[in-house]
Image: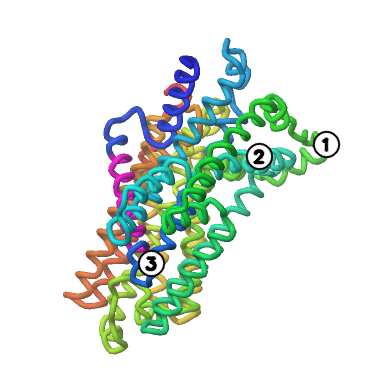
């Protein structure tokens, strides 16, 4: 038992460190504050969901929603963390050589996943249970059911998600470009989810009144029925809470303990075979002399070769790609959505919370609203800061660029170009889409391009300069650099201040001095940002020495 507790504590510490910085107190404090804010926002939305269910007379559906959301949170967390925590270990040989039984090793890692999934699931379910107990039915029996639900609801889905994560990892290991396929599929899936969610939000906001309320009530009732039908534990907990069924509570408890126990036994008996299957990758065919010559000729110049290397690095590390590619996606989705639906129609529909205006009122403030558009693209652009951590992400391979017979300006320029060129192209395409659809005029499209790129270029050069001065080559996982690195934090936080502050000032200037003054402000900030970013880059190249010595 002592060995089990020690190993589980190590795993919990590793999982905690993967979610927040552990070197800088300031970074840790910011991460904790951001986490508290996100948890509070999620709790607020879930409370509103619970109140909505009660207002429609669907309080009996709250237990099913609580169990399903807790299970979903457990599945997502386990699916993301199982590979690297339970299997696919970088130090697998060291772990298995410990003088500890295999069952203890596997049990400690599975328990750490269960504990973490339960914590995440509690964030999703406790607000709903609180609403149910306060507004629907408060009794000792309901409290007992709620506590058991919070503790056990993620157990079965977590057990199933471990095998699903293994299956996906095993399948991906058989493909040469598995990471690229995985990234593309994930981006497409995320786009589909975003379109469905915001499309439903727009349609719901566009159809207000009694008919819309009836449709919403019917939709929530249908979802509740599907949850009870498709996920038996949700149905069992619902019958236990609403009907006082001891049999339902017993079935929920027994299944939530038996299924994970069975999964643990299967996992520990086949643990060696499972990890061996993940290491049996398909070997790539060696390139012929002609293919090598053709690839070299396509590279053309050292600068182009370095740019291609940056793209391969970005697409070769999924966590790096996910943290730096969603901004491109957001910009294109925003441009297409505004072109298809229309900015005026979105605001008049009431789909934007807190915005209730009529057609005449919109016409009066249309210029002010259009002047805010470039700042949305600034916000999206700073979510693509791949150059900001491009030095540290090289890790132990940093000696390759550091010993290359090239000036630092070429090396750093390639890193910057690999990020700045696609961002500029994406913003330009978005501006053209908005211009072609009539949402902005030529000057508005120019504002979107210049302001969006100028703000991004300034912040990403600040991040790159910080990474050059203090690179982190000792990381053990890319998340140390991509999610918790100081350069990324500078770009994201500084960019958010720039986007929100610049947008607010643009609105104030437009409101008090006129739309033309707001346009001038947007263009001026964009031009100044681009020039300042270029000056920072030149200064970085002058002061940078070989970062191999850092």
**Between 299 and 364, the one nearer to me in the picture:** 364
Disc 2 crowd, CA 10 A, few/some/many (<14, 14-19, 20+):
some
Numbered disc in front, either 1 or 3: 3
Residue 382 location, x and y as percent? 40, 53
- Does residue 519 appear left or right of residue 59 in this picture? left
Q: Quadrant of the C terminus?
A: top left
Q: Which residue is mark 1?
A: 288
Q: Which residue is mark 2?
A: 169
CA gap, disc 1 to disc 3?
65 Å
In the image, the segment drawn in magenta is 30-49
Residue 535 location, x and y as percent? 35, 46
Numbered disc in front, either 3 or 2: 3
At a point 44% along the width and 58% down the height, the residue shown is 243
Residue 263 visible in the current orientation: yes
- Does residue 315 appear left or right of residue 140 in this picture? right
Numbered disc in front, either 2 or 1: 2
Mark 2 falls on what kind of element? Answer: helix
Q: Which residue is mark 3?
A: 53
**Between 169 and 504, the one nearer to me in the picture:** 169
- Does residue 534 appear left or right of residue 114 in this picture? left
- Does residue 298 appear left or right of residue 84 in this picture? right
As drawn, 203 above or below 412: below
Q: How many labels were placed on the picture?
A: 3
């Amino acid at each position: 038992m002592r060995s089990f507790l020690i190993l589980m504590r190590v795993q919990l510490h590793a999982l905690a460190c993967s979610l927040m910085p552990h070197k800088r107190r300031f970074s840790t404090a910011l991460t904790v504050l951001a986490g508290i804010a996100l948890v509070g926002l999620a709790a607020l939305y879930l409370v509103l969901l619970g109140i909505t269910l009660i207002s429609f007379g669907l309080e009996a559906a709250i237990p099913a929603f609580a169990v399903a959301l807790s299970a979903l949170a457990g599945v997502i967390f386990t699916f993301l963390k199982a590979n690297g925590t339970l299997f696919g270990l970088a130090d697998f040989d060291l772990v298995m050589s410990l003088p500890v039984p295999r069952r203890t090793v596997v049990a400690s890692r599975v328990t750490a996943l269960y504990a973490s999934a339960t914590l995440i699931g509690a964030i999703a379910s406790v607000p709903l249970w609180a609403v149910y107990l306060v507004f629907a039915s408060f009794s000792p029996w309901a409290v007992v059911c709620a506590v058991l639900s919070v503790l056990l609801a993620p157990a079965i889905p977590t057990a199933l998600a471990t095998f699903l994560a293994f299956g996906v990892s095993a399948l991906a290991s058989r493909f040469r470009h598995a990471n690229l396929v995985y990234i593309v599929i994930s981006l497409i899936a995320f786009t589909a989810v975003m379109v469905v969610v915001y499309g439903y939000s727009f349609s719901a906001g566009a159809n207000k009144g009694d008919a819309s309320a009836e449709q919403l009530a019917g939709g929530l009732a249908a979802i509740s029925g599907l949850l009870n039908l498709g996920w038996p534990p949700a149905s069992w907990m619902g019958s236990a809470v609403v009907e006082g069924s001891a049999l339902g509570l017993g079935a929920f408890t027994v299944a939530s303990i038996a299924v994970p126990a069975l999964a643990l036994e299967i996992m520990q008996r086949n643990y060696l075979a499972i990890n061996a299957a993940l290491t049996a990758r398909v070997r790539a065919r060696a390139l012929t002399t002609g293919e090598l010559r053709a690839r070299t000729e396509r590279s053309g110049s050292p600068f182009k070769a370095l740019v291609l290397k940056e793209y391969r690095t970005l697409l070769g590390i999924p966590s790096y790609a996910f943290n730096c590619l969603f901004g491109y996606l957001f910009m294109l989705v925003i441009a297409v959505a505004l072109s298809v639906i229309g900015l005026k129609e979105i605001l008049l529909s009431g789909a934007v919370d807190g915005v209730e205006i009529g057609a005449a009122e919109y016409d009066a403030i249309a210029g002010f609203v259009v002047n805010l558009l470039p700042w949305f693209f600034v916000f999206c652009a700073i979510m693509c800061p791949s150059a900001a951590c491009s030095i540290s992400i090289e890790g132990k391979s940093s000696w390759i660029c550091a010993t290359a017979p090239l000036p630092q300006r070429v090396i750093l320029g390639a890193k910057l170009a690999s990020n700045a060129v696609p961002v500029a192209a994406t913003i330009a395409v978005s501006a053209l889409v908005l211009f072609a659809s009539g949402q902005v005029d030529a000057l508005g499209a120019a504002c979107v391009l210049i302001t969006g790129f100028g703000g991004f270029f300034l912040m990403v050069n600040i991040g790159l300069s910080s990474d050059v001065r203090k690179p982190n080559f000792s990381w053990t996982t890319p998340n140390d650099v991509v999610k918790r690195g100081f350069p990324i934090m500078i770009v994201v936080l500084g960019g958010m201040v720039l986007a929100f502050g610049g947008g607010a000032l643009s609105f104030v200037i437009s409101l008090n001095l006129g739309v033309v003054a707001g346009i001038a402000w947007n263009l001026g900030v964009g031009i100044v940002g681009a020039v300042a970013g270029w000056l920072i880059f030149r200064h970085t190249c002058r002061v940078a020495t070989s970062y191999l010595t850092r």
